[in-house]
Structures are given as structure tokens and as C-alpha cells.
Image (cartoon, coloured by chain):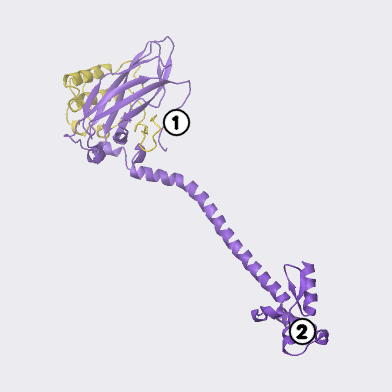
Chain colours: A yellow, B purple
Amino acid sequence: MSTAMNFGSKSFRPRAPDKGAFPLDHFGECKAFKEKFMRCLRDNSHDNSKCRLQSKDYLECRMDKQLMAKEPLEKLGFKDLMDQPSTEKPETKPQG
Amino acid sequence: MLLPLLLRECCSRHGLQVASSVRSCIRTPDWRELHSLRGPSLLRGQGRGPLDSFTEAFLLRRAPSRLHLQSRGAKGRKNYRQAQEEEWRQRNKTVLTYIAAAGVGMIGMAYAAVPLYRLYCQASGLGGTAVAGHDTEQVATMTPIKDRVIKVTFNADTHASMQWNFRPQQTEIYVVPGETALAFYKAFNPTDKPVIGISTYNVVPFDAGQYFNKIQCFCFEEQRLNPKEEVDMPVFFYIDPEFDEDPRMARVDTITLSYTFFEAKEGQQLPLPGYS
């Protein structure tokens, strides 16, 4: 929200997120995936493009634990990662 | 109304003119007097002369001829004045109708302006409002623009009375438009009571805000933290690929996403922003 009273310039309008709000992960069920993602970011100097697999894994975990509405991965922008198997997973997960 | 009428009748009978302003009789030469006979005998005999042709004209619904105005005098002038007043009244009515129509039109335009302005804002993207055509299907089909790297920095704030420890888990992240990205914030409730928070966000620079699309986040909904609880709060977002094509964004390399948490009362609902 803009606090400046300058009517000439544009102000910021917040918009609601497309898919609503994430439910809180009170029990830390997906904390492990989050840690993997954060470690990946730190190792790759915070480059998101290199850590997309980890973010995909985190979102998949959320969907499995009912912390996120299930969506096909293309809708989340992971179309290019669909063919790759997920990294170091204890159990295999069905893709797509 | 009656008095001038009577006066005029009386004066015309005597071949006299009525000076309307003075309401008295002024003697003006009647055409009959001028041309032929003189004297009161004429008037007595033909006292109703000037009246005849006028009554005739009036009864036959003919407009009194203007030629007779000067000599016909009072009655002619009265009718002329009546016609004029009638015309003025007509004109006034027309003007009033136009003014009333304009007034109603203004009020209607004021009511119509609200949806029209909304449409205009959506079409032109002024004020950072959602651009029309921004749909969720775009996420599935968009392609990342690899050569335009944008640094997204994160900022976390809390309201003064809000006691949560709220901070981002990464200071910055490098994304490209068209690619979805994940970022985390952390919140900790150090108090002994459950606290409910509601957050909102801000994107700087403002113009870039219209390209910053959040797929899912933790804003605008109540988030409840139990005492001494710490949670990770993810934000899943992307930058619209059209960001690269906007000339105004050519020099924008850094976007700052700033979240602010407020304490919410039980059952309070923040209205979702936008025009829904």
C-alpha cells in the first residue's frame, strides 16, 4: 500500500494470490524439503533456476500432506521438470 | 387583468390609444379621422369600428394582422404581447427541458463512470491494477526468458504491536521472468498466547508490481501461531514474461517484495484486494 500522497505517480495495488493462501505447516512435515531447497539456494548463490527441482519436491510434499490443493505440475510451471525423476527420494512418487 | 381590458375597450371605443405603461388614454389619430370625417359624430356613430375587424379576426381564429397594429391599437397589441409571452413560455419550456435532460445525463454518467473506469484501468494497466487477460492458464504455457535475470529481495515487517519474529529465510533470489520461484519466510511466536496474524505485501518499484504474480502465499488470510511455535511460510510466485517487453521496465533489475504482519482479532476478515 502506498503511503505517499502524490497523485501523479502510480501507487501499488496488492492483488490476491491466484490460488489463495498456503495453510500453515504447523507440524513441519515438509521441513526437510524446505531445508534441501534452502541449501541448494545457498550453494548456487541464490539462483532460482538451479533449484527448481527442489522447489518442485517441496510443493509435491505439500500436496501429499494436504497442505496444498493438488494441482498438475504444469499448472505450477514445472512443465520442463515433469520428465525428470525426483532427486534422492526415499519412496517413489508418481509423476504428473 | 380585467382593468386593462376594460380600459382598452373603453379607449378604443373612443378612438383613443392606451399607453400601456401609463394605463391612461392617449388620443391618437384614427385612420378614419385622418382620411375623412372628423368630429365626435363619427365616433359616436362608428364607435365600434376599430373593434369589428379585430373581433372578426379573433373569432375566425386568424392572427391579427400586424399592419393594423399601429392603428388597431390596444387589442392588437395585447394579442401580440400574448403571442410573444406564449413564445417565451414555449422557449423557456424547451430550455428547461434541455437543462433537465443534461442534469439527468450527468447523474447517469456519474453512475456509469465506475464500471467504465474499472474497464479502462484494466485495459491500460494504470495504477498497478490487474491487467485484463492475466489468467492462471498462463503459468502452464509461459516460457522463461533466460537472459533477463532479476534479483528479488525480501523484506519482512511487523506492526508495532505484533510480537512475532518475522523474517525472510533468504535475502535475495535471482529469477527470470516466466519461471516460477519459491521463497520462504519464517515466523516465530515468542509469547505464551496464540496469536493470529494477517499480512499484506508490497512490491517496489510500483510499476513492476503488476508483473509480480503470486500463485500462492500466506497473505490476506488469518494465520494462527500457537505459543512458542515457529513455522515456515512459503511464497510461490513468478514474474510475468511480458515484463521483458515493457519499455518502462527496461532498467528494472531489482524487485523488492515486502511483507507486513498485523495482529488480527478473532474472526476478522480482511477484504481481498481487487475488484472481485
Residue A26 is tagged as none
Q: Name above or below for residue A24 compared with residue B129.
A: above
Q: Residue sitting at 39 percent across and 37 percent down?
A: A7
Residue B49 is tagged as 2
Going by the numbered disc 1, the residue's amino acid type is Pro
The reply, left or right, for residue B244 in relation to residue B41 is left
**Residue B143 point in image, percent of width and height:** 20, 37
Image quarter hosting the C terminus of chain B: top left
Outermost residue on the bottom side: it is: B36
Q: Residue sitting at 19 percent across and 20 percent down?
A: A40
Q: Residue sitting at 67 percent across and 70 percent down?
A: B81
For mark 1, does the 10 Å Cα neighbourhood hold few (<14), some (14 to 19), or many (20 or more) residues? few
Residue B271 is tagged as 1
Same chain for the residues under marks 2 and 1 in the image: yes
Residue B136 figure quarter: top left
The reply, left or right, for residue B243 in relation to residue B131 is left
Q: Please, which chain is the residue tagged with disc 2 on?
A: B
What is the distance, in whole Å, between disc 2 and disc 1 at their CAs?
A: 88 Å
Going by the numbered disc 2, the residue's amino acid type is Gly
**Residue B221 point in image, percent of width and height:** 40, 25
